Image: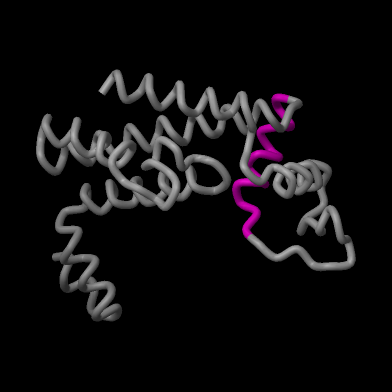
Amino acid sequence: LVPLVLATYLVVHTREMLLPEDDFWIHFPVISLLGRGTIPPVNPFLPDLQLFGHFGRDLLLAILSQFSGDIISSTWALNHATQFLSLVFAWRLGLRWSGPKGAVLLPWFLFCGLSCGSRVGLIDTYDNNNGLVYDSVLFFLYLFEQARRPWHWLAGGLCYPRRARRFTR
């Protein structure tokens, strides 16, 4: 697991030093607008057009940049933190599902084995909102796993929302 942590750190650090984000030209002005209190943010290039989209990560970075004073360093720290949390959640899920072997295999598979188009697993797919999304998915999988009978609860909640309590007893 230690080699995977080091590889993840080096990949993220190297890519962040070369280019902070793959579409920073739209996100960084929006982060700056949110940091100045413009909510909802306007399109920074064409102010007459409404800017539709998701601003959760941009708002989080605007808040973090208020403390650090720099959007790029806040982005760097958040991307590293989300990658590390994804790795920890994958390790815990693998450990819970299939013991020590799973604790090694699941993170390696997720970070190096999946092919997401032109990207290579989660080790290469961390920018924009991806890190927070993967953290959320892995965290909710972990919470479902921690529940008493998570699949009964999930099936009961999806199939019979009014009778979901019956499936959890």
Q: Residue at x 44, y 38 (%)?
A: 124
Q: Judge by depth and name the residue closer to the eye, 149 or 125.
A: 125
> Of 90 and 37, which appears nearest the observer?
90
Residue 147 belongs to magenta span: no
| Count of marks placed on residues | 0
Going 53% across and 23% down the picture, which residue do you hit? 14
- Measured as percent of width and height from the top left, residue 38 is found at 82, 52
Q: Quadrant of the C terminus?
A: bottom left
Q: Is residue 12 above or below residue 114?
A: above
Q: How is the image coloured?
A: one colour
User: Which SS type dominates the magenta stretch?
Assistant: helix
- Which of the image's four quarters has the N terminus? top left
Where in the figure is residue 61, as x and y percent of width and height?
Answer: 65, 39
With 131 as the anchor, is 113 left or right in this view?
left
68, above or below 45, in the image: above
| Residue 85 screen position, x and y as percent | 40, 34
Q: Is residue 55 magenta?
A: yes
Residue for point 12% across, 30% down: 100
Give the magenta range. Answer: 54-68
Front position in the image: 167 or 82: 82
Q: What's the residue at 41%, 47% (across, down)?
A: 134
Judge left or right: residue 155 versus residue 59. Answer: left
Direction from residue 161 to residue 69 in the image, left or right? right
Q: Of all residues shown, which one is farthest toward the front?
A: 118
Say whether residue 10 is left or right of residue 69.
Answer: left
Residue 62: percent from left, percent from top:
71, 40
18 vs 149, nearest the viewer: 18
